[in-house]
């Protein structure tokens, strides 16, 4: 694996691979943060998940079609380890531990995807935005100032929550007015996570 990997650097906003492209290989994140997203309507996108150091991206392209069903974009300067597809598949056949862990990863991601699809179908906008904020906090943690350890735009929050920018902005403004969230430029801090969590458990809109 050491001899067959390549370290690739990506700038903030740079596309790692595009939806519809042929799968060339698999990426492991050494440094940085990445959003995985897909087209949603004419000009919108839905953020499927976020990935950071130690995570894998590009695995959704594994299968018979060999076409990426999603895109991946760097949210900050990032370094990814790239392995060509044929070598990665050959490694899975001889490395039982890697194959098992990848299977467990797929199972966990499938469960999370199913949960998000239920949320998109049944949860009101406020609940979806609340869920998105809590998911970001769980994924990235907080920095020394107490803000989420990711610099994220309102548009990306909207795309992750499966709603419009206007709706996400309205909900975020309500959270700020209620003292549940603190915002400084693109930095976000969750002041009352328990109250925010409550919006994911009921039908408040």
Image (spheres, helix red, strand yellow):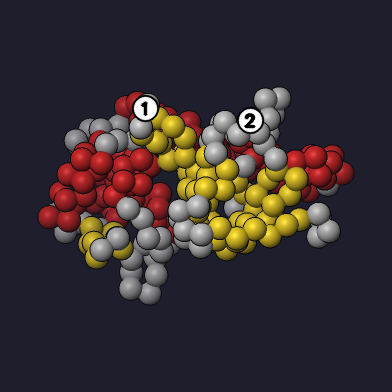
Circle 2 SS class: loop
Q: Is residue 169 left or right of residue 134?
A: left
Identify which residue is drawn at 44% across, 32% down. Answer: 39
Figure check: 167 above or below 78 = above
Image position, residue 171 (x, y; %)? 20, 45
Give the tally of numbered discs.
2
Q: Is residue 26 left or right of residue 115?
A: right
Q: Which residue is mark 2?
A: 67
Q: Report if residue 200 is visible in the image.
A: no
Figure check: 124 above or below 54 = above
- Which mark sits nearer the N-terminus, 1 or 2? 1
The residue furthest bottom is 144
Circle 1 SS class: loop
The residue furthest left is 177
Identify which residue is drawn at 65% across, 33% down. Answer: 22
Q: Report if residue 152 is visible in the image.
A: yes
Identify which residue is drawn at 57% across, 48% down. Answer: 16
Q: Quadrant of the C terminus?
A: top left
Image position, residue 147 (x, y; %)? 33, 66
Q: Which residue is mark 1?
A: 42
Image position, residue 116 (x, y; %)? 42, 35
Give the distance between the C-alpha atoms of the residues marked 1 and 2, in whole angstroms.
Answer: 20 Å
Figure check: 124 above or below 158 = above
Identify which residue is drawn at 73% across, 57% down. Answer: 6
Image position, residue 108 (x, y; %)? 57, 40
């Amino acid at each position: 694996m050491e001899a067959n990997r390549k370290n690739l650097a990506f700038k903030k906003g740079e596309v790692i691979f595009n939806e519809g492209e042929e799968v060339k290989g698999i990426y492991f994140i050494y440094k940085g943060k990445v959003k995985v997203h897909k087209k949603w309507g004419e000009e919108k996108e839905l953020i499927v998940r976020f990935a950071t150091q130690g995570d894998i991206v590009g695995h959704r392209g594994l299968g018979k079609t060999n076409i990426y069903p999603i895109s991946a974009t760097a949210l900050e300067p990032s370094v990814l380890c790239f392995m060509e597809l044929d070598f990665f598949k050959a490694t899975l056949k001889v490395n039982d531990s890697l194959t098992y862990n990848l299977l467990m990863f797929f199972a966990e991601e499938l469960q999370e995807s199913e949960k998000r699809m239920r949320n998109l179908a049944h949860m009101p906008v406020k609940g979806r935005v609340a869920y998105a904020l809590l998911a970001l906090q769980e994924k990235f943690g907080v920095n020394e100032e107490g803000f989420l350890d990711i610099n994220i735009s309102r548009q990306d929050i909207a795309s992750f929550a499966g709603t419009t920018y206007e709706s996400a902005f309205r909900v975020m403004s309500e959270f700020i007015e209620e003292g549940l969230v603190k915002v400084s430029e693109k930095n976000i801090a969750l002041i009352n996570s328990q109250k925010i969590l409550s919006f994911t458990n009921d039908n408040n809109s």
